[in-house]
Image: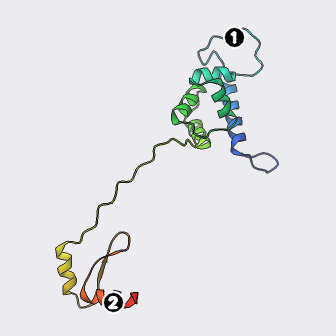
Amino acid sequence: MGPPYGGSIDRSTEIREFLRTRRARVTPGQAGLVPDPRARRVPGLRREEAAQLAGVSVDYYIRLERGRTQGVSEGVLEAVARALQLDDTERAHLFGLARPTTTRTRTRRPLSPQKVRPALYRALDCLSAPAVVLGRRMDVLAANQLGHRRAEFRVR
């Protein structure tokens, strides 16, 4: 939901508001912390308490809450989600906002060279029309004699 005046919220503001409101929902008692006898100026957890529960430094948590999420790992985001007791939808939203940069990318296996079976060569030779066999990258893997002539004619 955007601001009431119709403008847009930048990502760092959205992360800040999201983490701040979720932190305000969790009381120290709910988080299993011993309540601090000092007066609380904020509802819910303090930043220091959220950082402690997530197992990160206070400075790092403050950086996250300010929207500086470049380089944040999935592990840290998971820890913050647990500390703030986020449900699955909120957790997914946090990950979407933070866009972790250290996610594993699937490495592509090199493609094996494509080969034409001997039976296909024989079938090509039996055809009386130009015929070519194209590979997955649209390269010519095989052609009959008329197909070769046709391809040479187009190239020139």
Task: Look at the image and tell me in which quarter the N terminus lies.
Answer: top right
**On the image, numbered disc 2 is attached to which residue?**
150
Q: Quadrant of residue 114?
A: bottom left
* Residue 63, percent from left and from top: 67, 33
Q: Residues within 10 Å of mark 1 (few under 14, many from 20)?
A: few
Query: As rendered, which of 55 and 71 lies closer to the eye?
Result: 71
What x and y, as percent, mark residue 10? 72, 46
Residue 71 at x, y percent in the picture: 57, 39
Whether 136 is drawn above or below 122: the answer is above
Q: Residue furthest front?
A: 156
Give the amino acid type for the residue marked by disc 1 in the picture.
Answer: Asp
| Residue 67 seen anywhere in this rendered image of the structure | yes
User: The C terminus lies in which quarter of the figure?
Assistant: bottom left
Q: Quadrant of residue 127?
A: bottom left
Q: Residue at x 24, y 88 (%)?
A: 145
Q: Residues within 10 Å of mark 2 (few under 14, many from 20)?
A: some
The residues tagged by marks 1 and 2 sit, at their Cα atoms, a distance apart of 85 Å
Which residue position holds label 1? 36
Looking at marks 1 and 2 on the same chain, the residue that comes earlier in the sequence is marked by 1
Which is more foreground, mark 1 or mark 2? Answer: 2
| x then y, percent, for residue 77 | 56, 33
Left or right of 133 in this view: 11: right
Q: Nearer the viewer, residue 97 or 73?
A: 73
Q: Secondary structure at mark 1?
A: loop
Q: Reply above or below: 84 against 152.
A: above
Numbered circle sitting on residue 25: none
> Label 2 amino acid?
Arg
